[in-house]
Every structure is written in structure tokens, then in C-alpha cells.
Image (spheres, grey):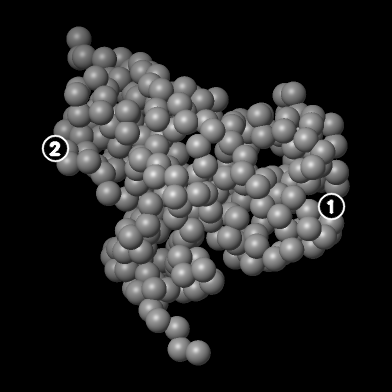
Amino acid sequence: MSKTIYIATRGSALALVQANQILDQCRAAFPDRSFELKIIRTTGDKLQTASLANPDAMLPKGLFTKELEVALLNGEADLAVHSLKDLPTELPDGLKLGAVTEREDARDVLVTRGRFGSLKELPKEAVVASGSPRRQTQIKQLRPDLKLVEIRGNVGTRLRKLSEQTELHATMLAAAGMKRLGYSINDAGKLGGTDVPDNIFVIPFAVTEMIPAVGQAAIGLEIRENDPEIQKIIDRLNHADTWHCIRAERAFLNAMGGGCQSPVAAHAVILSGRIQLEAVSFQTGSANFGSGVGEVGDPETVGKVVAAMVDAPKIT
């Protein structure tokens, strides 16, 4: 009998949904092998009150990944499942990103208490809750009058806070995470799902309006380097187009010197056989946009070129 393959994951509701998706795919592709989940609590799970948007908070890198990586390096797990947007571009020695799943809906959504037709219809100086520097900076570009406040917790917690804390008008979430958790949006924009408070509505942002986080809506599979057995397994799960796109996005982020909580964003797609990358950085305090097109076979160059464009001094 071959040894059991252990899949490391966080214990949050979304992490478990994603890990079970990978578990099911592994079992379907390799019915003669044994696969099991190993649930691990991460630093980010323990620091529920920490501010992700505060640059002075001195938060450790890999908030939601470090403990899973330790398990890989110690041989306690064979692959780790991550929301790819949480995975730093610089990985510990001996580890690598081995595969990614097909990207889900990469859009961000504005979740409101009460129905609004668009972001423009929110009241003047409305309060929007978000712990993401990327989302905070982009929404301030769209509506400078809005007041941004911190929020932490899983999707259910955030929806409950929005419903109960009347000083809040809206929050921002990822469409992919909500879909994976079983939430739905009807034609009127009303949010449906288990234990959804009444009067909660959703307004999706276009990816050109609110550029997503690097790797958003893709699941990343991290493994040990030089582990051909596990690489062979996850090769069956890898989605080629998403793989090329996220390599361009992560090359951009790496060239910008940013981590997962930096106020930068990038989103790549493949159109007509070429990679198209749109990106923005708010690291200087203002919005610096860039875009580029390149070959599918060389996605890293696309990311680096766009990073150089975004990071270049602006002539005024």
C-alpha cells in the first residue's frame, strides 16, 4: 500500500471548502491512493484583532501560510492548499508553488445593508468596512468622501457585523469566496444563503474598476521541491491558462517588492493566445496604472515589464 498523502489546510470555513475540493479531485484522479486532510491553525487565525491595513503593525509575513509550510518542510504534510492571494511570492527554501486550480470569478463585490444601484448611490461619507489596503485605496479613488474602517472575521461574521452595526453602510468581499461558501445573488442583487441577514445586497465591481489581488479566486497548491511523486499528482489538477496568468501576476508583485498586504493589484487574462495584464500600485500614495501584453510562454516577463511601468517616476 502506498503511504497516505496528507493535505494541509487552515481550518476556516472557506479554507475547508477549498481543501475538500482538492481532496475530492485527488481521490477522483487517483482512486488507488489514500488522501487525508490535516487541519492547521495559522498565525493569521490567531491574530483576529490585528490590522492588516496598518503598515506600522509589523505583522509577520505569511500570516495564513507559515504553519502549513512548516508542516511541509517537516514532512508532516505533502501538499498545502492556499487561497493563492494569501501566498507570498517568496517561498521558504525547499518549497514551491506546484499547481493552481482554474480561477473562479475574480471580481470583488460591494456588500450593502439595503439596496443601492451602484457605489455612487451610497450616502455621502458612508462608512465602508474593509481590512484590505488594496480595496481601501481603490475605493477611495472611486469615492474619496467615503470613510474606511477596519473589519476582520470570516464572511458570516462580516455579514452579521454589517447587519447589526448601523454605523456601517457596506463592506467588500471576494466573489469567489462567497460562491464557494454557497452564497448566491438573485436578479435584484439580494444575497442569499444560510443565515444571511435580511436586507443584504451585493454590487459586483468590474475587474477594470476594482483590480483584484494577485492570484485572487485561484487555489494554489504548494509542495516540496524535488518531490516528483506529489508533483505528478497535482499536475492532474493544474489549470494551464490560470497557471500562466498567475505567474505574470506574481512576477509583477515580486518585482514591486510587495507582499500580500501591499496596496497593489494585478489581473491577467489570456486573449487571442496572449497574456494581457492590468495592474495598479498605490505605494506612492497615488494611483499608478500599467498594462502589458506578452507571450503565454513567458508570463514572468509580462509581469516584470508592467511592474517597471508602474514603478517608473511620473513626469508632471
Instruction: Please identify the quadrant where the N terminus is shown.
Output: top left
Q: Amino acid at mark 2?
A: Asn
Question: Farthest residue toward the front?
Answer: 56
Q: Is residue 179 visible?
A: no
Is 137 on the left-hand or right-hand side of 11? right
Element type where label 1 sits in the image: loop
Q: Circle 2: is it few (<14), some (14-19), or many (20+) Cα within 10 Å?
A: few
The residue that mark 1 highlights is: 116
Q: SS of the residue at dot 2?
A: loop
Q: Who is closer to the viewer here, 21 or 142? A: 142
Q: Check the image and name the residue furthest to the bottom.
A: 316
| Camera-nearest residue between 238 and 153 | 153
Q: Earlier in the sequence, mark 1 or mark 2?
A: 1
Residue shown at 74% from the left, 50% from the top: 127
Q: Quadrant of residue 49?
A: top right
Vertical arrangement, residue 19 with respect to residue 150, above or below: above
Q: Residue at x 54, y 71 (%)?
A: 287
User: Label 1 neighbourhood size at 10 Å, few (<14), some (14-19), many (20+)?
Assistant: some
- Residue occupying image coordinates x 72% and y 33%: 161
Q: Quickly name the residue at label 2.
A: 226
Residue 303 visible in the picture:
yes
Q: Most extreme residue toward the left, as rendered?
A: 226
Residue 292 location, x and y as percent?
42, 74
Picture quadrant of residue 158? top right
Mark number displayed over residue 222: none
Q: Is residue 12 left or right of residue 257?
A: right
Between marks 1 and 2 in the image, the one whose residue lies nearer the viewer: 1
Residue drawn at x 48%, y 58% is 263
Task: Check disc 1 and give the amino acid type.
Answer: Phe
